[in-house]
Amino acid sequence: LLAVLLLTALSYKSSSLLLLSAGTITGRKSDNLKPIRYKERRESAGVMKRWLYSTLHDADVTAHQVEYHQQMSRWVLAMHGSGEPYVHTLKPPGRGGSGPYYAIWTKGGADVLASAWRVLRNGDTEYIDAHSYVSPIGSVREMTHVIDVYGDHAGFHGWFPDAYGHTIDFHLAQVAFLKAKVSSSTRFLLLDMGPLKKILETLNPKFYKRVTWLKPMQVARVNDGTLTANFHVSWAGTAEGYFPRYGANRYLLAWLRSLNPPGWEPSKQRTVIYYSRVFPEAKLGRLLDADHSDDVAKTIQKCLEKNGRDEKLVIFDGTITGEDGERRSMTLLEQFSLFRSASMALGPHGTGLANIVWMDFNRDTSVIEFVSGPFNNKDPNLDKYRWRTQSFGYWGLPFNYHHLLFTPKSTDDHVFIDLNILEETLDSIWSTGGATTMGE
C-alpha cells in the first residue's frame, strides 16, 4: 500500500478528473490580474554572421542574387535574430493559493493560445502574458475538466500542431530547448493533437514517458511542483507575413544527433532521395509535371554514375511497397531510417522535404530545394511562395544547402526546373564535396 501511495504522489496525474468552478482556479476577482511580461529582445544582425548563405542556381543567377540574399537575410533575422526563447517558472504560491495551472485553449491553426498561471494567497491571478500566452479569465469558463499532476512540470504549445511540417521544423526545437532547461525528472504538458505524439513515441520513447498529453480546454493543476514555460514575446514579422520566433535550433541539433530509436538500424547503403511531389500523392501546389519528374530522376541517376557515386537513388513520395505488393504510407520510423541514410535530398519546397531534419548531421549532408522565384509572378498561387524555403526554419543545422529556381513557364499545378542547371549543380556538389554550409 505504501508503494502504491508513493507511486501515486510522484506520478503525472491522479486517476480522477476534478470538476471545479472557474473562480476556484483563477482567483476570487476577475479584475485582480497580475500579468508577467517580458520585453522582446532586439533582433541582432549578429545572427547573420553565423550563417553562410546557401547557394542559388539558375540560368540567370546575377539577376536574382541581390533579392535572394535580401529575402534570406530578412527571414532569418526575423525568425532567429531575437535569440533563444524566454523561460519562466511559476512556483507553488503557498498556503492559501493554488496552482500553478496550465491549459491549451486552441486546438489548431496559426494562433494557438494557452495559459500558464497561479492563484496567489491574496486571490490575485498571476499569469504569463506573452506571444500566444493569455489570461485564463474567460477561457477557463469553457474548460472541460481539471487534471491533477504532481511534481515539477514544463508546458509547451505552438502553431499548426496538426501539421507535420511545422511540427518538425518548429515544435521539436522548442521542446528540445525546454527539455534542456529543466531537470531530467521534470514532466511535460503537451497538446494531444497532431504528429508530435507519434514522433516522440517512435524516436524518443524514454522522453515520451515523461509527457502528459492534454486535450484542448483541459486544465492541468500542478501539485507540489513548479511549472516552467518557454516563449517569445511577439511574432516574427516580415512583409510576407507573420511567423513564430524560433531561436532554439542548436538544441534541436543536439537532440537529433542523440537519437537512436528502437527498431532502427543504420544503413550501410547511403542514398540520394528525390522528393517527387507529383499528384495524387501531393495535392497542395508546387506539383511537378509527371513526365518532367521522370526526367528529373533520370538526370540524377546520370549524374550519380558520371561522378562515380555509390549512393542509391530513392524516389520518395511518402509511400512504400508493402510485403503484399501494395503501396502504403510509410511509417515514421521508415521515413526516419530512409532520410538518415541520405547524403543528399532534393525536390520542391513542401512538407515531404521537411524530412531533411532526419538526415545524419554527423556526416556530410546536401540539400537542393526547388523554389519559386521572380519569374513565377504570373501565377499568384506560386508567387506567394517566392523564396519560401525549408532553410528558414532549419537555420543553424549543418546542411550544404542549395536552391534551384522553377522555370518561368511553371504554374502552381505544373512546376518545372532546368535540367541542365540541375546537372551542373549536382556535378559541382559531387566534384567538391558540397558548397556553402548553413553554420551551426
Image (cartoon, helix red, strand yellow):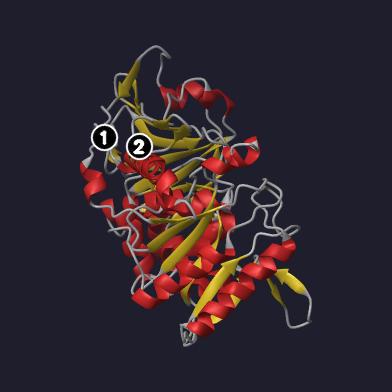
Q: Residue at x 57, y 79 (%)?
A: 302
**Image quadrant containing the C terminus:** bottom left
Q: Residue at x 49, y 45 (%)?
A: 388
Tell me if residue 213 comes above or below residue 140 in the rendering.
below
Q: Quadrant of residue 254?
A: bottom left
Tell me if residue 104 comes above or below residue 178 in the rendering.
above
Front one among 428 and 5: 428
The circle drawn on residue 224 is: none
Q: Residue at x 28, y 52 (%)?
A: 51
Front one among 60 and 23: 60
Q: Amino acid at mark 2?
A: Ala
* Mark 2, residue position: 78
Tell me if residue 210 comes above or below residue 26 in the rendering.
below
Left or right: residue 419 compared with residue 433: right
Front one among 93 and 167: 167
Tell me if residue 387 comes above or below residue 121 in the rendering.
below
Q: Secondary structure at mark 1?
A: loop
**Image quadrant containing the N terminus:** bottom left
Q: Secondary structure at mark 2?
A: helix
Q: Are marks 1 and 2 in contact (CB under 8 Å)?
A: yes
Mark 2 burial class by Cα count in 10 Å: few <14, some 14-19, many 20+: many
* Mark 1, residue position: 43
Expressed as whole percent of the image width and height from the top left, the position of residue 282 reads 69, 56
- Can residue 76 be seen? yes
Left or right: residue 27 compared with residue 319: left
Q: Amino acid at mark 1?
A: Glu
Q: Spatial distance from mark 1 to mark 2, Cα to Cα?
A: 7 Å
Expressed as whole percent of the image width and height from the top left, the position of residue 265 reads 48, 83
Expressed as whole percent of the image width and height from the top left, the position of residue 136 reads 45, 25
Q: Residue at x 51, y 48 (%)?
A: 166
Expressed as whole percent of the image width and height from the top left, the position of residue 278 reads 70, 60
